[in-house]
Amino acid sequence: MNWAEGAVLGLVQGLTEFLPVSSSAHLRVVAALAGWDDPGAAFTAVTQLGTAAAVMVYLRADIARLGRAWLRSLAGPVPGQLTARGARPGPEMRPGPGSYSNPAPDPALAADARLTWLIIFGTVPIGAVGYLFEDVIKGRFRDLRLTAGALAGVGALLGAADSLTARRTARGGAVTIGGAPRGGRPLAELSVRDGLLIGLAQAAALVPGVSRSGATIGGGLLLRYSREAAARYSFLLAVPAVLVSGTFGLHRLYREVRPHGATAATGATGEAGERAAEPAWGPLVGASVVAFVVGYAAIAWFLRYVSAHGFAPFVVYRIGLGLLLLALVLGGRIPATPA
């Protein structure tokens, strides 16, 4: 990989990571159309560290507040009554950088602590699936026919979920009650069951074409949460998952090149040395930096967009891209599997 390839793939990663269109699918498709080598699951995981940094910077106040509440919960019970359905409603997080305008009361502190635990629990499914099926994810899941089907299929599901949300909003009107849109439940009402279900949806995004944000936002909409709440939880849920994925991606690259380094140092040759080539660390770091900058801008735009619009453009794009990709593969224009 050279610097130009790294910059282009970093741009694609940053632009598509937080939009419900699947960054892994776009990385795979762009590389195939350009005639480049498949960047691979490890490249995707490492450049995700750039987009993870972007969401952590953008939501820094929310993450800091949630972290403080979680640490407080470790020290002892957090004041504030919790219900079986979720936490007592507290203020909804605003769709932009910053935090609440006033210090959170005890019920809001309890809601923050609960939300943080739900983010942790919701991360378990994708970690377990990624660990158990690592070889399949790196191999058979990168078939472009599967990617095309996932793009179109999940796009249709996202469209159905968004349509249901639009109808609920139309019935309830645009008026809000206590900061919670009538067209959907606020994030403060997130239950343990719903948090885990959305976490399971996130695990499905290990298949290129599904889209982590598309799966989690669609899951939130189907569970009757507002568009803003579903998108915000999706972004918060991404932080631990992407950090862990990126760290393991770095470890995997190191593990794969270590035999090469050992044989180079000793002057020996063999299958292990031939199989493990030194990654292009410079372009990889450059791609991650580009992904950070573009990812930050994409987050800022997307959260403002979903507060006033639906997901119809993304649905149409996903289905169209899936059908086009399938036609290109079946027509022999691009190979279905990496060389």
Image (cartoon, grey):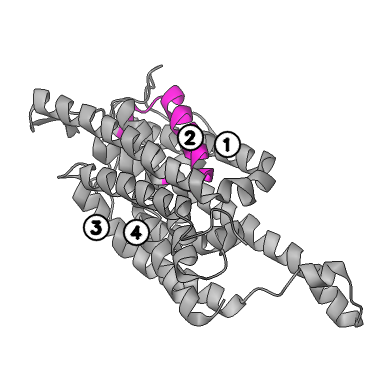
Left or right: where does residue 46 sit relative to residue 307? right
* Residue 202 colored in magenta in the image: yes
Counting from the top left corner in percent of width and height, residue 290 is at 42, 72
Q: Which residue is mark 3?
A: 301
Between the C-alphas of marks 3 and 2, the distance is 24 Å
Q: Residue furthest front?
A: 331
Left or right: where does residue 81 sit relative to residue 36? left
Quadrant assignment, res 40: bottom right
**Vertical order, 195 against 251 (above or below):** above
Disc 1 residue crowd, few under 14, some 14–19, many 20+, Cα 10 Å: some
Q: Are marks 1 and 2 in contact (CB under 8 Å)?
A: yes
Mark before the other along the chain sequence, 3 or 1 = 1
Q: Which residue is mark 2?
A: 199
Q: Which residue is mark 4?
A: 58
The N terminus sits in image quarter: bottom right
Which is in the foreground here, disc 4 or disc 3? 3
Q: Which residues are magenta?
A: 187-212
Q: Which residue is mark 1?
A: 124
Q: Which residue shows up at 63% across the image and 37% down it? A: 128
Mark before the other along the chain sequence, 1 or 2 = 1
Front in this rendered view, residue 190 or 148: 148
Kind of residue at badge 4: Tyr
**Vertical order, 305 against 127 (above or below):** below
